Image: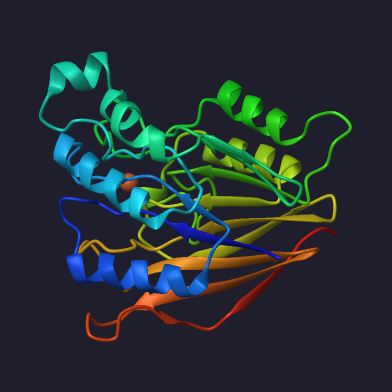
Amino acid sequence: MTRILHIADLHFGAEHPSLVAAFKDTARTLKPDLIVAAGDFTQSGRKREFEQAADFFAALNVPAIGMPGNHDTPVRALHERFTRPWQRFESRLRPHLQPRHDSEQVRIETLLTARRAQWRPDWSLGRVALPALKQALDRLNPAGEMAALRVLTCHHPLLAPGGARGRARTARAAQAARLAAQSCDLVLTGHLHETFAEPCTIDQRTCWFVGAGTTFSLRTRDEPAAFNCLDVTPGMIRMVPWEARSLAEGFQPAKARDLPLGG
Ligand SMILES: [Fe+2]
């Protein structure tokens, strides 16, 4: 079994310190093999927020995979945002977050869907570059080799409950979801601050699109702070959302859900 903790939308700068402490305790108990962090590590892309996030991952001491979200480029330093949008992430967080992972059990690729700017007014929405997606999917499927589980992770949802509405209006999402469903088993995302697992079956094979809640920010919208614990075994992923409904209780397991893989 491989245990993956899927966390997202940490939003350091707006985090609740007691939830950070509660998460560290719970992670120590769960003993994950890997952490997948689906973007939005900071609230405003400030240097000190990236440093807080770097300290958090250094203290966890678990191999972590991740890429930036829309909050991880400077909000106020506009010249830097336009000329070097991901430099703060690369210099401060990249040493703690790998862009990919490869083992016999699990192969993981990241895809950048956040943009420094867009032609549409809401720059927080995601956009998929199809050549970059195809490159990631090719890396997940090298000729002659088959990992037990092929995972793509990006910040913005490719397929979400309720369809491409509101904050889920990721550009080229429908095309991207179809391509991903043909070439991988699991797509892990954040951004919506919502826990979900949606299947997409093509040619009798099912790919799961899984969203994580915001792990310890106060920006919880209608959902509790949460993360997902994913236990991967041949042919099956057991997903347990861990939710913090109150600061006093910390993170508690919600109802488990089995996500069958394959045909
Ligand atoms: Fe986001």
Placement of the N terminus among the 4 image quadrants: bottom right
What number of labels is visible? 0
Q: Quadrant of residue 199?
A: bottom right
Depth order, front residue of 28/130? 28
Q: Which residue is at 29% across, 33% downward?
A: 92
Q: Which residue is at 47% across, 82% downward?
A: 254
Q: Is residue 48 above or below residue 28?
A: above
Q: Is residue 231 above or below residue 163?
A: below
- Residue 204 image position (x, y, % from top left): 84, 56
Horizontally, is 207 left or right of 194 in the view?
right
Horizontally, is 79 left or right of 239 in the view?
left
The reply to whether residue 7 is visible in this rendering is yes
- Residue 258 image position (x, y, % from top left): 67, 74
Looking at the image, the residue that sits furthest to the top is 83
Q: Which residue is at 44% across, 75% downward?
A: 242
Q: How is the image coloured?
A: rainbow
- Residue 225 image position (x, y, % from top left): 32, 69
Looking at the image, the residue that sits furthest to the right is 144
Placement of the C terminus among the 4 image quadrants: bottom right
- Residue 168 image position (x, y, % from top left): 41, 49
Depth order, front residue of 9/198? 9
The reply to whether residue 117 is visible in this rendering is no
Q: Is residue 226 above or below residue 175?
A: below
Q: Which residue is at 24% across, 40% downward?
A: 50
Q: Is residue 61 above or below residue 98?
A: below
Q: Quadrant of residue 108?
A: top right
